[in-house]
Every structure is written in C-alpha cells, then in structure tokens.
Image: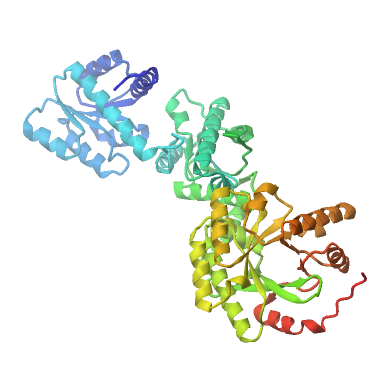
Amino acid sequence: MTVTASNTSSVHKLHSDLKSSLIMMVDDEPIMMELVQAFLEGEGYSKFLTLEDSTIALQTMKERRPDVLLLDLNMPVVDGFDILRSLRASAEFSRLPIIVLTANSDSASKLKALELGATDFLAKPVDPSELALRLQNTLSMKTYHEQLIYFDALTGLPNRRMFVDRLKWVLERGKQTEATVVLVNINLDNFKKINQSMGMLAGDAVLQQFSESLLAQVHNQSLIESDDDSDIRFSLYRLGSAEFTLLLPAIEDATTIKRSIHAVNTALAKPVVVGQHVFKMTASTGIAISAAGEVEADDLIGRATDATLVASESGGNCVRLFSEEIRALSKQRMELEIDLRNAVANGQMRLYYQPKVAADTLVVIGMEALLRWHHPTRGVVSPGVFIPLAEELDLMPSLGEWVIFEACRQLAEWSSRGMQDVKLAINVSQQQLGDERIIESLSRALDKYEVSPSSLVIEITESLAMGDSDFILDLLNQIRELGIRLSIDDFGTGYSSLSHLAQLPIHELKIDQSFLLGPQDTLKMTVIIKTIIAMAHSMNLTVVAEGVETAEHLELLRRERCDIIQGFYFSKPLPADEFFKYFNGWGSHDIQLDL
C-alpha cells in the first residue's frame, strides 16, 4: 500500500482521536493504576477515570461512559467476573472494549474472562509496550465498528441509533443535574424533488454540503459549551434521508435556542452548488424542550417530530415550537395518513369527470378524470390536502394505478350504454412517470376492459415533461406506441425549451387556467393565449383551454381558434352517473354567445 500525504494525515488524526479516549480503570490496587496511567500519559493519552471501589463501577460507567475499560479480576465484594457479566448483559455496554489486567495468569481464569466477553487479556505485571499496542488496537477496532454501526456513511455524522443512545444518556444525566435538554429537528423541504429530477448523486451532494455548513455553524455559534470535541461531535445527527437533529444537552437560557435557529438559517442561506446547478434550500424545523429530564427520550423525539411536521404542513421554511396544540395537529395528520393508506381498499376513492367541449361545435367530446376522496367522517377531502400527502408517502403509484383501472372500467361501462367516441384524460404524477410499471398498468387495464387506446389521454405537467430528457422521452414514446394520446398539462407555467418540446411525442397542449383566471392584463393575456395557440397549431398539436368560467372566456378562445374548452362555464366535475346524464342531455343546454 502506498502511503500518501492524505493517508498520513488521516492516520495522524485517527491516532489523535484515539488518544482523547476516556480510559477507565477498576482495580483495588491504586499503585497499579497510577503506574499504568503514568505510562499511558507518556504515550499521549490524557483522559483517565480510576476506581478502587468495584461496587460502584457500573453506576460510574453509566454516568461517565468510558471508551475502554481496564479491569482487574481479583477484587473484594464485586470481582471482575461479576462486572463482566453485568456489562455484557447490558445493551448499553455490550460492545464496550474490556481489557483484563490481572495477576491470574492461569488458563482457567483467562478462558472464563474471555467467555464472559473480555476483549483482551494481559497478565500482571503488564509489559508497557504490549499494553500500549493492545490498547491502540482495541480502540482502533472500536472506532471502526462504531463507524459502521453508529455513523452515517454519506455525511460522517452520527446516525439515528447513536442519537437515541446519546439522548437517553443526556436525559438521564439531566435528571441529576436538572439541566434543560433541547432537540432542534430539521427536515429539508422538497428534497425528494432534487432526487427525482436531478438524481441521487446530486441529492447526496446537497446533503453533504448542508451538513458541513450546519456543523460549522454549531461551532461558530458556540452551541455546545464544552472543551471536549466529542460533545460537539455528538451534537448534530442525520436521522433520515433529509432529516437532521441538533441535540443541545445543557442549555441555560433561551438565547441558546435562538442561536441554534440562527445556525440553521445561516447554513440554509449558503447556496448549495452541484455541477452547473445552484440550490437554495429551506427547511421545516421543530423544537422540543425537556427541563430537568422531565420527558423520556421517545416522547421528546415525538414532540420534536410533531413540531417539524406542523412546520412542514404550514408550508415549510419555518420553525415551530412543540405545544399541546401541535400534538393535536400532528395526531390529526397521522390519522389522515392511516386513513389515506386504506382509502382505496375501503372504497373511499372516486373519480369525478369534467366535460371537455369542442370549441367550434360546442359538443361534448370527452372528459377529464379527477380523483376525489370521500372520507367517512371528514367528508370530501380536498385534493390539495391528500395529493401532496400521497406524494410524500409514496402512495401515488398505487393510487395512480387504481385511477387507470377505474377510468378504463368506467369507459367500458359508458360504451356499453351508448356513449361512443369520447376521450378520457387521466393525470399522471411524477412518481407514476418515474415508475416504468405504468406501461404494464396501462396495457393490462386496456386489455381487461377492452378499451380502445385512442380513447385515453395521458396528461403530464409541463415541468415533468422537461425533466430527465432521455428517460421521459423513452417512457412517453412507449405510451404513444400503445396508441394512447399524450397531453402537456399546465402549459405556460414552466420553462419549456421549444426544441425539446418539439421532440416530445405529444398530441396536445393544455393552456394553464391561470391565464384566464389570474389577475393579468386582458390584452397581455390575449396575446399570450393567441401565441400559444398559433405555436401549437404550427406543430400540429390540439389546444385545450381549462378554467373557462365566463362567456367572455369562451368567446375569446373561440375567436383565437382554440380546439377544446373545459371549465365551470360548462360544468363542475361530476360523479360518473351525473356525467352520463349531463352528456345525454347536453343538447338541451343553452349557451349564449355574442360573436
């Protein structure tokens, strides 16, 4: 192996970290402990805890949490074998390195000690050089195992397992010292979108840069008042994909909490640069406080999580302090999650249908399927509430599949009742389009209900169509090869490249309703709509306008030769049976035009 300057630096840092380990010695011979400590101090070790009274060894270890234990076997009342048994039976110390130092050099004692869980065994009188080597190897192995078990491989931060372990210890100590413990839980907003649109490597780079910035702010803001680097090291944890937590173990006043919020905001304010892309991150932050150890670990974690969840539900980019009101809101959200997971199985999801009308003849030529949730106690839950929740819970692929099958079933039923030559539009989410199984779902649904592919229209948003070009283009081509029509929804709200748009295998553009319903100047709105229609027609694309609510809207769109009209001026979304009646009675509708 070639040792580079970087390798050498890493080795020196590792040895430096090892030398800061807390070494605990339990021995009823104080002179022996003094000799061992003097020698190890000469080797660069600086932190020692010596104990003659073996009866208080376990309690002392819980309070001080040593990195390694040098243990004598022959001691009165509680001997080394008893301590070994107790430590290995404890989840807290089951992996603690224990080097036995004893005058019992017989094979039986050595074997018994090793069977009880001793890491290593040295006979007294101890050879100083051998002790130094054994100690270094033991601590190095401990560090390696801890890195695998307790630290996040991506950011290098301690992970959830280490966090829970450390928090329990901090709260237990807080009961004795009456210290106030604070958790600052941080969840990066919209992080999934970075992974989905830019790929996981870009997402990893964002997490690495943010964690480095935040850890630097922990130092800069002096959030951990300690001369011990390990206290600072164990202040910031990565708990999940984009979830981090600051553990402030002994704060004295509210200024520390304010400094922690400032640290988070400062870290977020630093732009994250990945290749040619610059990300400005925001976060939902929840704070929970335990005074004098009054709250157990699980409850404190739950409080911080609840506060973070409410911050996220409030739109993100904000901070919430836990309260009983927040707990109630979080409980409602949790209940909604559970209900949403079971909504399809319980028959609560339904499709409503909004008519689409040919602009020139004013004949109903199709409809758009819109998902609605009829909750047994909450009534109709707004799509603006449950769709983002379904996306967050990764439920959209399964919900989307249900929509595809239900829409095809309904088309088949309507066809058997005489409704022919209509086209049904279905919205497809980013999560669905990111799952290649959508092709299989579409094929199976069409076959099962013997529906003509040309009667289906798949709508995807403009921003989604402009995503991962190769992947999206390939998937759209596969959908088109099935004979299904493709539509770009919300057109005009994204940042389309016309050259890229021309490459997409689409059949129509759907003008976003904001151009009709927004506060824009009428003349500018007319120019924009006219431009979009002319551009689409030059590309042989059908144009659909949604959000049509007035006769003036309809007149404008007909004048500019828009192809298809959709909006409340004709009808709100209707249940299947009502839509069928509406379709059959359409000829009796009186539409007044002044052209």
- Estimate the x, y position of residue 294 in percent, counting from the top left: 49, 45
Q: Nearer the viewer, residue 506 or 173?
A: 506
Using the rendered image of the protein, determine whether residue 314 is visible from the camera's viewpoint: no
- Which residue occupies the foreground of this view, 50 or 566? 566
| Quadrant position of the C terminus in the picture | bottom right
Q: Quadrant of residue 538?
A: bottom right
Q: Is residue 88 above or below residue 560?
A: above
Q: Quadrant of the N terminus?
A: top left
Frontmost residue, 560 versus 390: 560
Q: Residue at x 46, y 35 (%)?
A: 155
- In this rendering, would 79 be left or right of 557? left
Depth order, front residue of 498/391: 498
| Quadrant housing residue 366 | bottom right
Depicted 460 relative to depicted 580: above or below: above
**Can the viewer see residue 417?**
yes
> Percent position (x, y) of residue 311?
62, 49
Residue found farthest to the top: 42
Left or right placement of residue 588 versus residue 152 in this view: right
Residue 255 location (% of width, % of height): 62, 32
